[in-house]
Image: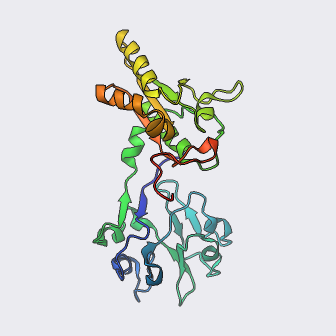
Amino acid sequence: MAPLYDTLRIEYGKCPPDCSACEQACAKEKGGSNGNIVRIRALHVPQANFHGAVTCIQCSQPRCQQVCLAGAIERSQLDGVVRIDESKCVGCGMCALACLYGGIYRDPVTYKSFKCDMCDGEPKCVQACPYHVLSHIKNDPIQRYLKEEDQLTPGSTLCPGCAAELALRFTLRVLGKNTILFTAPSCLATTLMGLDTQAGVRLACLSSLFTNTASVLTGIKRYYQHIGREVNVVAFVGDGATADIGFQALSGAAERGENIIYICYDNEGYMNTGIQRSSTTPLRA
């Protein structure tokens, strides 16, 4: 798995009207002699009641780098930051056109491109934001939890970009090999159990019914306690098996204080049977 890099996080659309504290801090730090080099932009659209900020998101496969004929753009393997060497930039503007997120800007005088470089690890815009809309996420503490190799086998039966797969991969990287995995009927079940002769995970995995996932976990956990072996018993199931059909068994396990791990990936419906709403689905979702 690729390393995790620190991230500049923006609560999109949560800025107060007319605030430009991030721009002012960036201009002070990076603005140059005329103060016009601002690498984060406040975005206020009062007609749509939208107030936010826009900057580079440090793409893992930067399109700006791909189109730069001068070779002025590089993505660091040390911190994941995409940087522009302005001494190499010829001012063609192709990088700004290629950026899908509006994160590259051009100097109105020299026409050279510039962008956020995360202040080399200490973003001044984050420090200046009085409303905590901006935050600097340090990923090193997360990285230290990922002690194990990936427990999912290559390939996936899920939709491209499925957040459940990503969540499951990170969960198993943290919990490790001493884990028994459980699932219930869902779109994720085929990935966990595998298809044909191909296993989905490198761990012991059991599929329960919709109605009894928590009960099955309880029984398996108590058996291992009886023989004196400590294991992680983990359910990774959807909202239907959690909040609707399987809630009775889950409620009982919680009331008894069973030592099990129960993870609900709430994707707002019964996805593999036509996207019917579940009881956790917000109104008009």
Residue 266 drawn at (x, y percent): 48, 45
Q: Residue at x 52, y 30 (%)?
A: 210
Q: Quadrant of the N terminus?
A: top right
Residue 139 appears left or right of 70:
left
Q: Quadrant of residue 18?
A: bottom left
Q: Is residue 232 visible?
A: yes
Q: Residue furthest left?
A: 130
Residue 146 drawn at (x, y percent): 44, 38
Residue 4 appears left or right of 21:
right
73 or 164: nearer the viewer? 164
Q: How many marks?
A: 0
Q: Residue at x 54, y 24 (%)?
A: 205
Relative to 282, does residue 54 appear above or below in the rendering? below
Residue 241 drawn at (x, y percent): 49, 35
Q: Residue at x 72, y 26 (%)?
A: 196
- How did the renderer colour the structure? rainbow
89 or 67: nearer the viewer? 67
